[in-house]
Image (cartoon, rainbow, N blue to C red):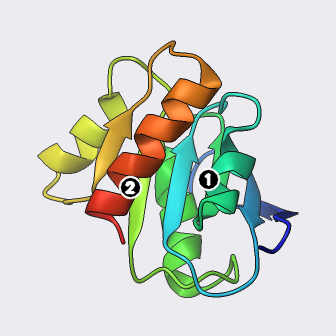
Amino acid sequence: MATPAKRSFRLTGAAGPPVEVEVTSAAGQRPVVVLSGRPKSGLAERFARAGFAVVSFDPPGAPGLEIVLDALGRGVLDLDADSYALIESRDDGSIALARAAAGVCVPGLVVGDMPVELAAAAIVQWLAKHLV
């Protein structure tokens, strides 16, 4: 299994401040997980070792998410974006709900305050069922 590598990007959009993005992935084509908000320590690496490419960014919010998803779709992040899931660390699920209200159907999951390993195991299982 390849060791996950990290790359950083600074993205700009038409409105709002620039968005700092980190991509964590091992080699090869992988489904993409977008982590919105400050991810729990070690979570991106755990997902990468489980076979996913991870795009994480902070601050969370709809404008930043749109910039990240646009860059992902245009290939700016050097990832194959045929499929992706959105995971947000906010308890209210506001980003996923806003996207659903706008008619955008994206597999999504909200992560609360569970321990990292428990959260990672549950999320990997969910991603394998819904994304792969």
Residue of label 1: 47
In which image quadrant can residue 97 be found? top left
Q: Which residue is drawn at 76% across and 72% down?
A: 26
Residue of label 2: 127
Q: Which residue is drawn at 61% across and 53% down?
A: 47
The single residue placed furthest to the front in the displayed view is 1
Residue 8 on image: x %, y %: 85, 61
Q: Determine if residue 41 is in view.
A: yes
CB within 8 Å, label 1 to label 2: yes
Answer with left or right where residue 121 lies relative to residue 57: left
Residue 65 versus residue 39 in the image, above or below: below
Residue 37 on image: x %, y %: 59, 33
Q: Which of marks 1 and 2 is nearer the N terminus?
A: 1
Residue 92 versus residue 131 in the image, above or below: above
In which image quadrant can residue 27 be found? bottom right
The span from disc 1 to disc 2 (Cα, nearest Å) is: 10 Å
Residue 104 on image: x %, y %: 20, 60
| Placement of the N terminus among the 4 image quadrants | bottom right
